[in-house]
Amino acid sequence: MTRGPERLQNVFDDAFDAISRTREAFKPTLAAREIGAITSVATGIAKVSGLPTVGFEELVKFPGDLVGIAFNVDENEIGVVLLGEYWHLNAGDEVERTGRVMDVAVGDGLLGRVIDPLGRPLDGKGALAASARVPIERPAPPIMDRAPVTTPLQTGLKVIDALIPVGRGQRELILGDRQTGKTSIAIDTILNQRDQNVLCVYCAIGQRASAVAKAVTTLREAGGMDHTVMVVTEGNDPPGLAYIAPYAATSIAEHFMEQGRDVLIVYDDLTHHARAYRELSLLLRRPPGREAFPGDIFYIHARLLERATHLRKELGGGSLTALPIIETEAQNISAYIPTNLISITDGQIYLSPSLFELGVLPAVDVGKSVSRVGGKAQRAAFRAVAGDLKLAYAQFEELETFARFGARLDEDTRKIIEHGRRIRACLKQGEASPLSAPAQIAVLLALTAKLFGPVPLEEMTAAEQAVQEAAANIPAEVRARLGSADKLTDEDRKTIVEIARQALAPFQPKPEPEAQASQAPAAKAGQGPKPEAGPVPKHKAEAGGGLRPDARTPAKRGAKRHE
């Protein structure tokens, strides 16, 4: 009976000894916490007082796990951009400093995932397997850390790879009116990187939920999500999320670039980004400028796109290629934001609504599009094949305007127009159907050799498809040279042209049997004896001057009737 209380006493003694040791080991520490209070809340922003040592762009914490970025640091209060739903905030709520800047999760675990700019998953696949967190705002690589852009980034689109080549590490702007196919070009480019060892980051800024869902579905069905990270903000999200989205996406892409990998990033689109920044700036009482944009609107895009580059081999040799998208209004490419982006980037791809309405897809206006890296970022085979193609197409577009007025054209002009129509037909391409380099080169070589000349326009699609399928018969050694920096030899050119000629043989027009049958009797009738014409008197030949009888003057015709 006495053993029970003794055991219980031993248990109490052990527990008290453990508590005593823990109490003796505990050393209280004092941590300074800076607490402020909300003075007012507006659409996407909050005014806060009581944080005297807060830094610019520092994160501050609000009730309900909501965070914000200190945007305006004034003497008496700070303006904070809210990064989430803020309807539960009220004046007087506590605000706490965090002592850190905004960062985002990075790593290979993000591939195939759809996240928001704060790193929260949106695809319902569970938590992210991130390897690290990096700040969203980082300085661009110095000039001495960069290498020239020499390697092409194949988009799989004939009109771009041949006429407006894009290199790895380049910044190529895609601009045009709404609903002209800007996002389709970006999605097709992402799909074409599946076997090119290029990772992709797609940043949707203020897009409709239906448009984002369509892009995700297209990538998943075509197998493009395996090498892609999607950073998404929808149109109903707070403007603060739309503002930080491209910076967060760029930090994710930079992490891969610093590992020596090639990365493609698409900003869709920076027009919404500029409008979100304008909204925040006006709410924070920053002085407006042209089109009500703040004075540093150029700087926010310049510091973003300067992070796209090609690093030196000593730093891994990775690259970050940027494809920013801009929406124009009524084809006005000289507006404020488009001209800003044109001056920042290394070229632009302009999509014309007129070509889109004519069914020329992708609706790339070659005359207004340019790549300032140009042939240096183009494979030698493409450069040799497409050298004269742009000039011939430009001549066709200029002559086509005159042909619409019903002007009489000489034979050379008519040939240029017919050749240009076949160039336009060959540059058409369906959505989500990128082409391999050998198939593109086979079509372009057939164009430059004018093998499509006899093919009727209504059969151009089938004829081009036949050439693309025949490109699989190109010998392996020739295909290897097409994918390298080696130039096309004359033998290679002859081999590809001969394969294209055999593929186009069924599309050559055949003489109609009815026309042949009608020409035969006419030829036989023309072989019969002709009535002999009597000799023409010398004085009549001189008087008529070699004119037809009905071409005499009225005076002579009247004299004849009088006789």
Image (tube, grey):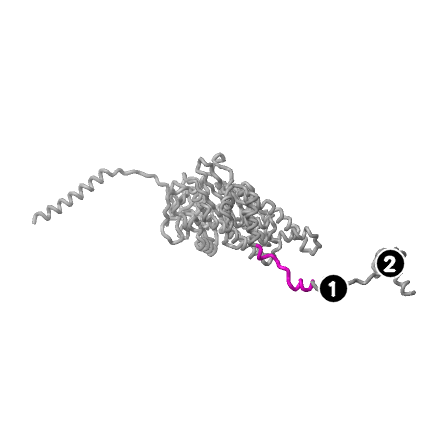
Judged by its main secondary structure, the magenta piece is: helix
Whether residue 285 is visible, yes or no, is no
| Mark with earlier residue (2, 1) | 1
**Residue 473: x %, y % from top left:** 51, 51
Q: Which residue corresponds to mark 1?
A: 525
Residue 456 bears which disc, if any?
none
| 447 or 78, nearer to the observer | 447
| 117 or 127, nearer to the observer | 127
User: Which structural element holds mark 2?
Assistant: loop
| Magenta-colored stretch includes residue 310 | no
Residue occupying the point 89% across, 63% down: 558
User: Which structural element holds mark 1?
Assistant: helix
Provide the residue span drawn in magenta: 504-519
Q: Which residue corresponds to mark 2?
A: 536
Q: Quadrant of the C terminus?
A: bottom right
Indicate which label's residue lies in the foreground, 2 or 1. Answer: 1
Residue occupying the point 89% across, 60% down: 556
The answer to whether residue 438 is left or right of residue 546 is left
**Residue 357: x %, y % from top left:** 58, 56
**Residue 91: x %, y % from top left:** 41, 49
